[in-house]
């Protein structure tokens, strides 16, 4: 019996009877490593500075033969499933996916499928826990997919255009610009005509950054590194049909080089795309894909980029895309601008799904591949944050760190708000990514509400689900690692996120160009979906600094360098000193006949705070030129 495979919401009271006999049901069987303990130990040793095995990475074939399920084991699982009447739809040493009718599902997994009414929606689930044959029990990690639920994974970004909509429309009366107005650098343009907000005078927020400004701000330009010799994989759901053309147009429009022939490649299978209604389909992910590809190319212009499009935003398809990367060693660094939650009103993340992801991450570490994940855009992900947050999951049951970003084998990339000193992009300051937003009142005499409501914030926090990993022990304050996000104390030290942070605030946005069925246009995007590909590009630059030697799983190296000049310690100085928050006016101009203006307060994350040293809003801080230099010698 596989415990917890029947969800808690599948109650007798909600039971509406058996699923129709002709229903096609899909399921995924995750497979155990032939040496799970050995894989974890090798992944740790090869990633830890000072270990005798440090940097002695395996090839993909070596890792598979040593640690993954054997061909004979995979065939045994095939035999069990097909003998029950199920059809194999995909198979690897990580997982076997099947489809079939409810009768075949019951023969294979020992449970009937019924429909249940949950919060007004009909969903199906097993009536009992799954039971599998003893002959394959040592091979099977778990079974997922038998319960239908809305996918919780989504892109961790939002467009400035989206932010311009909503409450707060005013008729122009006092001379505020009717055309969208922004500053070339922090504090450049005074918002003349704006009413008093947090301070007597406000300036317009910064224009969306171009890649050249970010390269300048983070020391990449000065380092002379371009990511040459490194390969970055980007994983999102589905794919844009115009990605290469859009990326090239964007690059050349801003003084950068287009991709060389063969520098950008794609691994996509449109015939197998599924769950488009629940996941948003290709159109719902096109902005994310454009952002990710253009950020990586912008900050590491000579790195190879391979886009690996998952067949949906469901965990089984996303993990299959990641497994494909490690099984074929398609890249050195993997950028993931998506995240989900461990605990929602639909239930908890299945243990089998977590174990499947971790096996992939550990295999990647053994091969010298690192995985970067967006930490989220909803602060502490609590229902309080979700009440007003723009990119939150309303099904969250409590304050919690996101997943997979909180996994100890992933690098969690948090967000900052970056202020530059000049149009070139020289670094000015950073504070934590977290904004309060107020709208201009209709009479233009004030802002409502003031202080504003929480709108957008970088993710992070103390995980209740994962113990503190070995690399965090001497860096993360005990007060953080021993206090859960609910406020409850923890007897054991726990994993805290994020690990690092880079610019991602919606109101210090980055410029993105895309078309995908519409005329090409450019606009600003924000989110830790910006931060993750930024850091992946930095890692590609670092690999060049190491003359092509992989970095692999980055966290041990990150914490080894914590507190040094490799990172800027991001501190919310206004909060520490009790001063009014940094603020700016975001003027989107006239939209639908009304003036759309917002007052934005920065460094106001929900439940997370940027303090001196490691913190749960920005981790160890943001990387500098010295970080890139230091990688050459490690």
Image: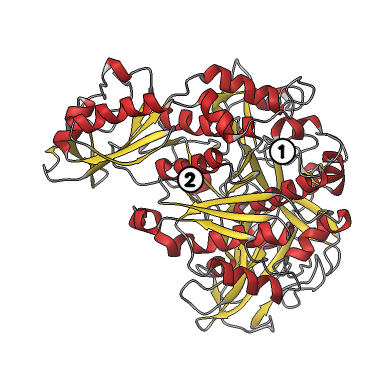
Q: Which mark is residue 619?
A: 1
Q: Is residue 254 left or right of residue 458?
A: right
Q: Where, by quadrant of the figure, is residue 609 drawn?
A: top right
Vertical order, 459 against 156 (above or below): above
Residue shown at 54% from the left, 74% from the top: 169
> Badge 2: how crowded within 10 Å, few (<14), some, or many (20+)?
many
Residue shown at 38% from the left, 24% from the top: 73
Residue shown at 31% from the left, 25% from the top: 76
From the image, state whether disc 2 or disc 1 is nearer to you: 2
Q: Is residue 419 left or right of residue 132?
A: right
Q: Secondary structure at mark 2?
A: helix
- Indicate the position of residue 116 as horizontal and vertical percent values: 20, 39
- Indicate the position of residue 107 as horizontal and vertical percent values: 17, 28
Q: Is residue 12 visible?
A: no
Q: Where, by quadrant of the figure, is residue 334 drawn?
A: top right
- Indicate the position of residue 604 as horizontal and vertical percent values: 67, 49
Q: Which mark is residue 321?
A: 2
Q: Secondary structure at mark 1?
A: loop
Q: Which mark is residue 388?
A: none
Q: Is residue 84 left or right of residue 529?
A: left
- Indicate the position of residue 159 as horizontal and vertical percent values: 56, 64
Rendered-image quadrant of the N terminus: top left
Rendered-image quadrant of the C terminus: top right
């Amino acid at each position: 019996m596989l415990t917890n495979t029947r969800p808690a919401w599948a109650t007798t009271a909600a039971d509406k009877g058996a699923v129709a006999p002709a229903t096609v049901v899909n399921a995924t069987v995750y497979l155990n490593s032939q040496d799970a303990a050995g894989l974890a130990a090798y992944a740790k040793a090869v990633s830890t500075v000072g270990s005798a095995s440090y940097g002695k990475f395996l090839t993909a074939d070596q890792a598979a033969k040593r640690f993954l399920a054997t061909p004979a084991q995979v065939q045994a699982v095939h035999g069990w499933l097909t003998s029950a009447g199920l059809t194999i739809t995909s198979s690897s040493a990580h997982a076997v996916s099947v489809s079939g009718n409810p009768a075949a599902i019951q023969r294979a997994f020992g449970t009937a499928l019924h429909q249940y009414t949950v919060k007004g929606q009909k969903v199906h689930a097993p009536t009992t826990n799954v039971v599998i044959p003893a002959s394959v029990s040592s091979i099977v990690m778990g079974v997922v997919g038998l319960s239908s639920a809305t996918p919780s994974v989504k892109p961790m970004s939002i467009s400035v255009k989206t932010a311009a909509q909503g409450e707060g429309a005013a008729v122009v009366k006092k001379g505020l610009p009717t055309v969208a107005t922004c500053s070339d650098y922090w504090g450049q343009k005074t918002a003349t005509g704006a009413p008093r907000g947090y301070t007597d005078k406000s300036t317009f927020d910064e224009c969306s950054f171009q890649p050249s400004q970010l390269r300048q701000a983070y020391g990449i330009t000065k380092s002379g590194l371009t990511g040459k010799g490194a390969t970055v994989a980007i994983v999102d759901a589905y794919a844009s049909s115009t990605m290469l053309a859009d990326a090239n147009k964007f690059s050349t429009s801003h003084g950068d080089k287009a991709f060389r022939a063969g520098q950008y490649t794609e691994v996509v299978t449109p015939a197998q795309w599924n769950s488009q209604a629940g996941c948003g389909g290709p159109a719902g992910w096109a902005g994310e894909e454009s952002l990710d590809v253009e950020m990586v190319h912008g900050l590491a212009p000579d790195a190879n980029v391979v886009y690996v499009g998952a067949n949906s935003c469901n965990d089984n398809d996303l993990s299959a895309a990641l497994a494909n990367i490690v099984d074929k060693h398609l890249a050195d660094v993997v950028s993931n601008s998506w995240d989900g939650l461990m605990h929602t009103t639909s239930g908890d993340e299945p243990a089998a799904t977590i174990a499947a992801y971790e096996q992939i991450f550990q295999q990647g570490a053994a091969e010298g591949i690192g995985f970067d994940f967006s930490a989220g855009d909803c602060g502490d992900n609590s229902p309080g944050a979700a009440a007003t947050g723009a990119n939150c999951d309303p099904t969250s049951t409590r304050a919690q760190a996101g997943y997979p970003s909180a996994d100890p084998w992933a690098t969690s990339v948090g967000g900052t708000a970056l202020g530059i000193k000049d149009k070139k992009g020289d670094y000015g300051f950073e504070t934590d990514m977290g904004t309060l937003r107020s709208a201009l009142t209709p009479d233009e005499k004030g802002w409502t509400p003031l202080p504003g409501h929480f709108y957008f914030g970088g993710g992070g926090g103390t995980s209740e689900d994962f113990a503190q990993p070995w690399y965090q022990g001497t860096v993360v304050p005990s007060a953080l690692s021993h206090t859960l996000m609910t406020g409850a104390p923890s007897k054991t030290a726990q994993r805290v996120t994020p690990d690092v942070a880079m610019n991602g605030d919606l109101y210090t946005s980055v410029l993105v160009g895309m078309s995908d069925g519409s005329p090409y246009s450019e606009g600003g995007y924000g989110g830790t979906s910006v931060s993750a590909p930024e850091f992946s590009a930095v890692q590609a630059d670092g690999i060049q600094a190491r003359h092509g030697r992989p970095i692999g799983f980055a966290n041990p190296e990150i914490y080894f360098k914590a507190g040094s000049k490799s990172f800027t310690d991001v501190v919310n100085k206004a909060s520490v000193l009790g001063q009014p928050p940094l603020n700016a006016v975001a003027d989107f101009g006239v939209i639908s006949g009304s003036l759309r203006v917002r007052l934005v307060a920065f460094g106001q994350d929900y439940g997370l705070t940027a303090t001196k040293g490691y913190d749960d809003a920005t981790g160890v801080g943001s990387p500098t030129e010295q970080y890139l230099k230091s990688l050459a010698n490690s």
